[in-house]
Image (cartoon, rainbow, N blue to C red):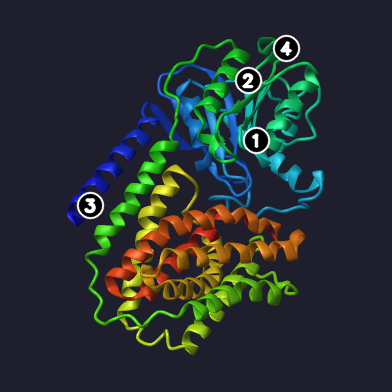
């Protein structure tokens, strides 16, 4: 059975990679030199003639990789496409700066960075002088505002848009795309359309894109704030809008990658099961599990205690928003859990020497194999040197937290209800922390999807390691390092 699962997993991985790489075939993908050192990538279709430039900008906590479906689709359509990492994001070593609450602060700096990328792309021999800005979420406001300044845009595609800069007649040729499951932003898309024509409805084109007066709003069905980036409806709408604006008829594949990305990740996770079977078997019986009362005390006490204890703390050492608080929250949560487990004898025999090398293998698999796939197809996972201290700081909290979690869940042997109590309890603890100090900690809400995905993917693999080796701490140690890495490369860096 392990060999069969390994074979099926590798076939799934190979087919998924083949399909994902197919969207790149026929394209020249290379670095784009930008004034100031902004990391940027240029996408060109081999053999295509001069064409408009499309500058693609990601949202908060995003990166170039997250916008690849649009970059690949529009490059295959013959456009000259430039995608980049904003300061503080992805591979960009320069932290975000300025006042985030002022239009003349961070917004102005990000507009200037977008303009530098546009000028670099427009200087390419294949650029025909016409320009498009395409942006998601946070970047939607940036590109709407930048489209009105030099270099001026001939068309704008704003995805999940929120911007007070939209008026009845600017920016030129505005397409607004929102997901069906992001209701507030779908309403904003309709509002922007009805500024141009109060009687217009979703899906209707107002004005004439060929004359620079077009406006349209599209709702991508059955997707939310991130899923809209993988929607076939959104990708086709963007390409068709640019073709209408520039009098082109584009062909080429549309990079609908979401399903293949899910298949790839599932294949990699599935491969973890036969690999775990190669680890040494458990050498001793696990300690008797805690009774229901003691389990609930250990599982639920830190849920309330940690947010209350840390509510008055304000610390800023790491150059990443809320990373200091998150490291403290994770660390204290884990230490409280481990202390109670030690009190009732649950730590005896949990830390033999082999925990270190097994934990290292778990971390290596998570960071290199699964992380490598994420970096290639989903979001930036390879940090620059400036993030090393952030990852190390988060590891001081993440490792104790996941050691406690792994031991309390008996390395995957605990009943499902106990696992659910642990997972939901931690998410509730973060929610309580935000409620107690919303203004300072609301950015913690951004990591909740990351935590849920982490529990689903890595928690499953941790259970396989724990059940095979009888050493929950090995999985907890490895996954603590993976969690610290994942969080350390997700949050934007800010200047002090």
Q: Judge whether 225 appears above or below 208 on screen.
A: below
Q: Earlier in the sequence, mark 4 or mark 3?
A: 3
Using the numbered discs, state the Cα–Cα distance from disc 3 to disc 1 in whole angstroms.
Answer: 40 Å
Q: Which residue is mark 3?
A: 6
Q: Earlier in the sequence, mark 4 or mark 1?
A: 1
Dot 2 falls on a residue whose secondary structure is strand
Measure the alpha-carbon separation of dots 2 and 4: 20 Å
Q: Position of residue 90 (x, y in %)?
A: 55, 50
Residue 7 pos. (x, y %): 20, 48
Q: Residue at x 57, y 75 (%)?
A: 333
Q: Nearer the viewer, mark 3 or mark 2?
A: 3
Q: Nearer the viewer, residue 44 or 356?
A: 356
Instruction: Describe residue 397's horizontal placement relative to residue 141 as left or right.
Output: left
Residue ID for mark 1: 160
- Marker disc for residue 176: none
Task: Look at the numbered discs 1 and 2 and tell me whether their residues touch, using CB distance below 8 Å.
Answer: no
Q: Secondary structure at mark 1?
A: loop
Labels 2, 4: front one: 4
Which mark is in front, 4 or 3?
Answer: 3
Q: Position of residue 427 (x, y in %)?
A: 58, 62
List the residue tagged with mark 2. Answer: 130
Residue at label 4?
207
């Amino acid at each position: 059975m392990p060999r069969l699962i390994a074979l099926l997993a590798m076939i799934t991985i190979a087919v998924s990679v083949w399909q994902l790489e197919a969207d790149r075939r026929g394209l020249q993908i290379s670095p784009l030199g930008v004034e100031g050192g902004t990391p940027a990538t240029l996408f060109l279709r081999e053999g295509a003639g001069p064409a408009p430039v499309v500058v693609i900008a990601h949202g908060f906590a995003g990166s170039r990789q997250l916008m690849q479906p649009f970059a690949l689709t529009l490059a295959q359509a013959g456009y000259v496409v430039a995608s980049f990492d904003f300061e503080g994001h992805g591979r960009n070593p320069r932290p975000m700066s300025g006042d985030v609450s002022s239009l003349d602060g961070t917004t102005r700096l990000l507009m200037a960075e977008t303009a530098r990328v546009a000028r670099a792309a427009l200087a390419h021999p294949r650029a025909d002088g016409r320009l498009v800005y395409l942006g998601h979420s946070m970047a939607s406001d940036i590109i709407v505002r930048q489209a009105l300044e030099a270099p001026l845009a001939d068309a704008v595609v704003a995805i999940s848009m929120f911007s007070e800069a939209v008026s009845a007649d600017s920016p030129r040729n505005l397409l607004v795309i929102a997901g069906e499951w992001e209701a507030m932003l779908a309403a904003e898309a309709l509002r922007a359309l009805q500024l141009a024509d109060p009687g217009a409805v979703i899906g209707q084109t107002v004005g004439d894109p060929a004359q620079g007066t077009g406006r349209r709003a599209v709702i991508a069905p059955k997707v939310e704030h991130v899923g809209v980036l993988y929607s076939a409806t959104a990708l086709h709408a963007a390409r068709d809008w640019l073709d209408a604006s520039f009098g082109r008829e584009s062909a080429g594949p549309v990079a609908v990658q979401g399903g293949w990305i899910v298949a790839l990740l599932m294949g990699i996770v599935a491969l973890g099961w036969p690999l775990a079977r190669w680890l040494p078997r458990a050498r001793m019986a696990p300690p008797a599990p805690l009774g229901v009362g003691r389990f609930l005390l250990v599982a639920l006490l830190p849920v309330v205690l940690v947010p209350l204890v840390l509510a008055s703390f304000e610390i800023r050492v790491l150059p990443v928003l809320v990373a200091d608080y998150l490291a403290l929250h994770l660390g204290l949560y884990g230490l409280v859990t481990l202390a109670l487990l030690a009190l009732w004898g649950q730590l005896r025999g949990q830390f033999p020497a082999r925990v270190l090398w097994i934990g290292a293998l778990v971390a290596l698999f998570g960071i290199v194999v699964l992380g490598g796939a994420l970096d290639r197809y989903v979001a930036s996972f390879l940090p620059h040197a400036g993030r090393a201290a952030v990852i190390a700081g988060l590891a001081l909290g993440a490792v104790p937290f996941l050691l406690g979690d792994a031991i309390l869940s008996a390395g995957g042997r605990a009943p499902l209800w106990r696992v659910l109590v642990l997972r939901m309890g931690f998410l509730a603890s973060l929610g309580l922390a935000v409620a107690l100090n919303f203004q300072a900690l609301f950015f913690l809400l951004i990591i909740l999807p990351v935590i849920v995905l982490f529990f689903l993917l890595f928690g499953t693999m941790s259970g396989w390691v724990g059940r095979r080796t009888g050493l929950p701490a090995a999985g907890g140690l490895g996954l603590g390092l993976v969690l610290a890495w994942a969080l350390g490369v997700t949050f934007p860096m800010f200047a002090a």
